[in-house]
Image (cartoon, rainbow, N blue to C red):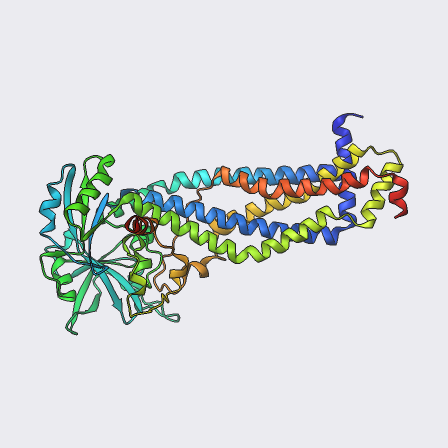
Amino acid sequence: MSAIEKQRHIIDFMLSCLWRRKGKNLSLVVVYTFVIFLLASVMFFAHAIKKEAGLILRDAPEIMVQRLVAGRQTFIPESYIDAIRKIRGVQSVTPRLWGYYYDGQSGANYTLMVNADLKDRPGEILIGKGVTLRRATAEDKIITKKNDSIPFKTYDGSYLMLKVKGILPAASELVTSDLVLVSEADFGKIFSISRDQATDLVLQVRNEKELSTIAAKIAQLYPDTRPILRNEILRTYDAVFDWRAGVIIVILSGAFFAFIILAWDKATGLSAEEKREIGVLKAIGWETSDILLMKFWEGAAVSLSAFLMGILSAYLHIFFTASALFAPVLKGWSVLYPDFRLTPFISPYEIAILFFLTVIPYTVATIVPSWRSATIDPDSVMRT
Amino acid sequence: MPGRKSDLFFGCLLAGMLLAGLMFIDAGVREHLDMPLLNQRAEIVRVLGLTDLCLFTEARYTRHPSMADLGTPFQDHPVSLEHFPSGAIVPVPPHLKQRTRNERQ
């Protein structure tokens, strides 16, 4: 009998044994698949959104300069610009004017930002897709369209009507959902901010290697300022998604431990019936190595099928149903949560780690107790 | 011998592996197809000078975490506890923690 034919006979026999205890084994595969599905979903989600955030924010401002007074961020005088521009290596310094606006009708917060293109067009705004839903209710989905007007409550209690002249592309919703772009004049009317102030400053630098040196020089020149580097913005999002994946894992850890106990008990503790089976096999001439091979195939069949079904269903969950199970955790109270679909960035390295942490331990755990039973005298095993 | 269990086992295993392979191919194709969209988003970020993803709009320190400071969540009144749910799933940005450590030293 060839080696391949021998393996096939052993697998035939192993599958018959599994089928004899189908209730127990099928429920194990279902729970095992579910655990891998959850782990893989968290892994796929965290990896894809981190990669996407990194790609989208790769062109974020190189250095931002904020001013802090009494521990709070405050407006920065435009007089700081000239001195900062003179620092060697700084290419340009642009003031940014932006802030938050609470819209009573929708109960949502918007980010209002001054846009240079609207400089000569006061009374006009460009809005993100989330803002178009400001009048929508659960029953009636009223959409704010181009040329509609939106009232903004100003600092003195009066209302300023601004006309929507454009909707920002839906594709950019992940960064612009709550954005309202206004002219500098209208921003001043809403918030009463003097003209020689900015929310923060955006710096462009000639050589990226000089970023930290320039940031240190700014902090030395104006000790009340705080420079933020692009690298720090990117690291913030790595931390946000690592943390969130960690939170989900902690919440699910109870279920994982319950599964580990179940699988360990099933894999390591042979039932009296299984021990007798091993005794009979040895009595009819099976070698210890054949029994270990059979148990290896048994562990591999259960864990491989659970692994494959788990990662495939996790892929469908995250990239085809837009993380339907995680969505409520991610959205929280955010009224304008963007409706975005993740690009499937998957890492073979992480899938390999998941494989080695789930399939290998289970397969090994099934072999060890069988080896113990298979090395005992068949007569005494059958009598127990 | 027709209809052997081992044939079924290897058939299922092969089908599972093929589907896993297709998963990688699908991911690669969709990544390639989505690249213009991602570049468009990156361009909007560059043109408008944006700094953060619009994930949570309920509190300013979760809307723009990279622009926030450590005091923001607690500045409403003395002994004010942070109360927005999204604050629980948005950690303190690493650069703020690093700065605090440097200032202590």
Q: Residue at the far top: name it.
A: A2
Q: Is residue A175 left or right of residue B8?
A: left
Residue A291 at x, y = what percent?
Answer: 79, 37
Most foreground residue, A214 or A138: A214
Q: Is residue A144 left or right of residue A90?
A: right
Query: Residue at image x 22%, y 67%?
Result: A150
Quadrant in the picture for residue A146: bottom left
Residue A16 at x, y = what percent?
Answer: 78, 44
Tell me, yes or no, if residue A250 can be seen here: yes
Query: Residue at image x 14%, y 58%?
Result: A183
Quadrant in the picture for residue A213: top left
Most foreground residue, A292 or A368: A368
Q: Is residue A278 left or right of residue A172?
A: right
* Image position of B11 with respect to A20: above or below: above
Q: Quadrant of the N terminus of chain A?
A: top right
Residue A289 at x, y = what percent?
Answer: 78, 32
Tell me, yes or no, if residue B4 can be seen here: no
Most foreground residue, A320 or A22: A22
